[in-house]
């Protein structure tokens, strides 16, 4: 049977809040996942908000590399538009997985709207419906 990986990214989650809840037994399902797998803390981006951090997660590069700095972007004029997956100017690991033939299920990861083509299923997440 092929290996499977479940990666959970919680925007704004903090182990200083989760650890006491885990110790009190309030989050038994999360405790079970951690026991069977692992956990870590990721260093965020500068600026430290979701709309720069998630593209860094998807690409492995800082905002200077992927080009997303805020929830809005200008497109050659005074008007600004919400950022989308197409705003990311660097290759994402989704392209790497697709090229390697890895089937992927991705659910509600910010900045995956408009959804990229992947091998598998993707429920887009983003600022647009």
Image (cartoon, rainbow, N blue to C red):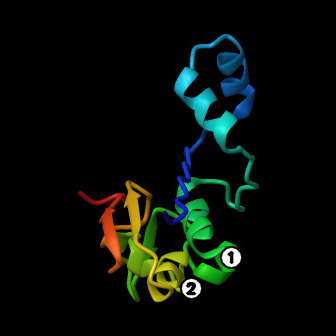
Q: Residues within 10 Å of mark 1 (few under 14, many from 20)?
A: some
Q: Are marks 2 and 1 in contact (CB under 8 Å)?
A: yes
Q: In screen coordinates, is 43 left or right of 18?
A: right
* Residue drawn where x is 46% and y is 76% of the image: 102
Q: Nearer the viewer, residue 56 or 46?
A: 56
Task: Report, in whole angstroms, how far the alpha carbon at label 2 lies from the one at label 1.
Answer: 8 Å
* Residue drawn where x is 66% and y is 26% of the image: 18
Q: Is residue 110 above or below residue 73?
A: above
Q: Position of residue 8 (x, y in %)?
A: 54, 48
Q: Residues within 10 Å of mark 2 (few under 14, many from 20)?
A: some
* Residue drawn where x is 55% and y is 62% of the image: 3
Q: Position of residue 67 (x, y in %)?
A: 57, 80
Q: Label 1 belongs to which residue?
A: 61
Q: In screen coordinates, is 30 left or right of 64?
A: left
- In the picture as drawn, the residue positioned furthest to the front comes out as 1
SS of the residue under disc 2: loop
Q: Position of residue 1 (x, y in %)?
A: 49, 63
Q: In screen coordinates, is 15 left or right of 13?
A: right
- In the picture as drawn, the residue positioned furthest to the top comes out as 24
Q: Is residue 123 above or below residue 24?
A: below
Q: Position of residue 46 (x, y in %)?
A: 72, 62
| Disc number for residue 95 | none
Q: Is residue 63 above or below residue 45?
A: below
Q: Label 2 belongs to which residue?
A: 90
SS of the residue under disc 1: loop
């Amino acid at each position: 049977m092929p290996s499977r990986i479940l990666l959970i990214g919680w925007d704004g989650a903090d182990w200083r809040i989760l650890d006491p809840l885990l110790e009190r037994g309030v989050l038994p399902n999360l405790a079970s996942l951690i026991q069977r797998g692992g956990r870590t803390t990721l260093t965020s981006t500068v600026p430290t908000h979701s709309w720069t951090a998630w593209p860094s997660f998807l690409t492995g590069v800082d905002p200077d590399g992927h080009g997303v700095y805020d929830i809005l972007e200008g497109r050659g004029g005074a008007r600004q538009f919400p950022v989308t997956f197409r705003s990311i100017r660097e290759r994402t690991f989704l392209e790497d997985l697709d090229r390697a033939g890895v089937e992927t299920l991705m659910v509600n990861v910010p900045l995956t709207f408009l959804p990229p083509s992947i091998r598998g299923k993707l429920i887009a997440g983003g600022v647009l419906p």
